[in-house]
Amino acid sequence: MSNTSPSVKAEILWSTIPAGAKDKILNNGFCVQCRTSVAIVDYTKKERRGVLILEGRRGVCVKFH
């Protein structure tokens, strides 16, 4: 994967995760404002040093809604 762009590497890493695990990951993001787990929405996938990173917005936050 050394000549592959970071977004392609991230997609490759994401594709190795089973669908059920993806759902759990996407529904257990951490909200820094309410300091609890929330769903991740409008996320992007990045790869850094072989690690998959998801960055996005929080879904409905329990504390603020």
Image (cartoon, grey):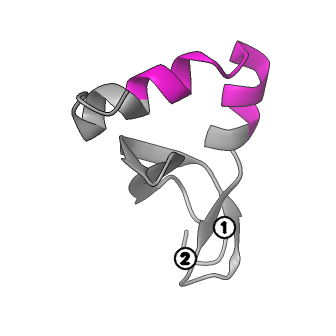
Q: Position of residue 6 (x, y in %)?
A: 28, 40
Q: Is residue 2 above or below residue 36?
A: above
Q: Position of residue 45 (x, y in %)?
A: 38, 41
- 14 sits to left or right of 22: left
Which residue is label 1 attached to? 62
Over which residues does the magenta segment extend?
11-24
Which residue is label 2 attached to? 64
Crowd tier of the residue under label 1, counting other residues whose Cα lies within 10 Å: few below 14, some 14–19, many 20 or above: few
Q: Verify whether residue 13 appears in magenta.
A: yes
Q: Is residue 54 above or below residue 18?
A: below
Q: Residue at horizontal 56%, vertical 81%?
A: 32
Q: Residue at horizontal 30%, vertical 26%?
A: 8
Q: Position of residue 47 (x, y in %)?
A: 40, 46
Instruction: Assign a secondary structure to mark 1.
Output: loop
> Is the Cβ of the residue at disc 1 closer than 8 Å to that at disc 2?
yes
Q: Verify whether residue 40 appears in magenta.
A: no
Q: Considering the whole magenta stretch, tell me its main secondary structure.
A: helix
Crowd tier of the residue under label 2, counting other residues whose Cα lies within 10 Å: few below 14, some 14–19, many 20 or above: few
Q: Quadrant of the N terminus?
A: top left
- 64 sits to left or right of 22: left
- Nearer the observer, 37 or 8: 8
> Which residue is at the far front?
2
Q: Residue at horizontal 39%, vertical 54%?
A: 56
Q: Is residue 51 above or below residue 16?
A: below
Q: Residue at horizontal 71%, vertical 51%?
A: 28
Which amino acid type corresponds to the residue marked 2 in the rendered image? Phe
- 43 sits to left or right of 40: left
